[in-house]
Amino acid sequence: MIYEPKLSLIEIPYISDRSTIVSEVKLSERGLEIIMESKEWVVSASFDACWGFRVLDEGDLSEFWSECDLTQGWLFEVLSGGWNELENTRDHYVTGKLYEPQEFLFIGLNECVSVLASEPPVITELSPSNKSKQTDALPRASV
């Protein structure tokens, strides 16, 4: 069974590049937190609750690369053909039968994270973008 993925880029102000990575994935009583970083910024993507998540090497998700890559962005909503659709083929996949989870895909240079949740993540800046900081030359002290 082959699934053709369909994705939608989630527009956020943190531009991806070849340095964008998934640096941390943390599940706690507060929910799921994914730390994404590049040479320009570090952000936290938080879900208050989720039904599940998986971390895979980018090579294991090659069917997605015709639809998305780091030149486009790093956060996508999977509209069809993703992990949720694959799980829905199982008779005992309760989440897919009782709810309508949204699927989000975080892509990094090496790892990718799929998340099944009811709402998009809240993105919080942890380290400001270097691009927004313009440094003017300091005036020379007179001697």
Image (cartoon, helix red, strand yellow):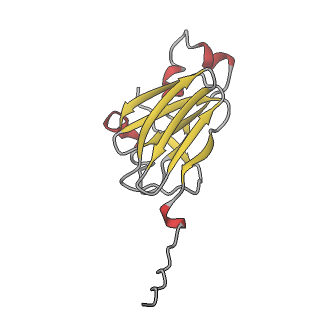
**Image location of residue 28, percent across then percent down:** 57, 22
**Residue shown at 42% from the left, 39% from the top:** 23
Query: Is 73 in front, or is 134?
Result: 134
Marker count (numbered): 0
**Image location of residue 123, percent across then percent down:** 61, 44
**Residue shown at 40% from the left, 55% from the top:** 39
**Image location of residue 133, percent across then percent down:** 53, 67
What is the residue that sits farthest to the left in this orientation? Answer: 59
State whether residue 43 is above or below residue 118.
below
**Image location of residue 10, percent across then percent down:** 58, 49
State whether residue 5 is above or below residue 52.
below
On screen, residue 96 versus residue 89, left or right, reads right
Which quarter of the rendering shows the C terminus?
bottom left
Query: Is 13 in front, or is 77?
Result: 13
**Residue shown at 48% from the left, 80% from the top:** 138
State whether residue 56 is above or below residue 92.
below
The quadrant in which residue 60 appears is: top left
Which quarter of the rendering shows the N terminus?
top left
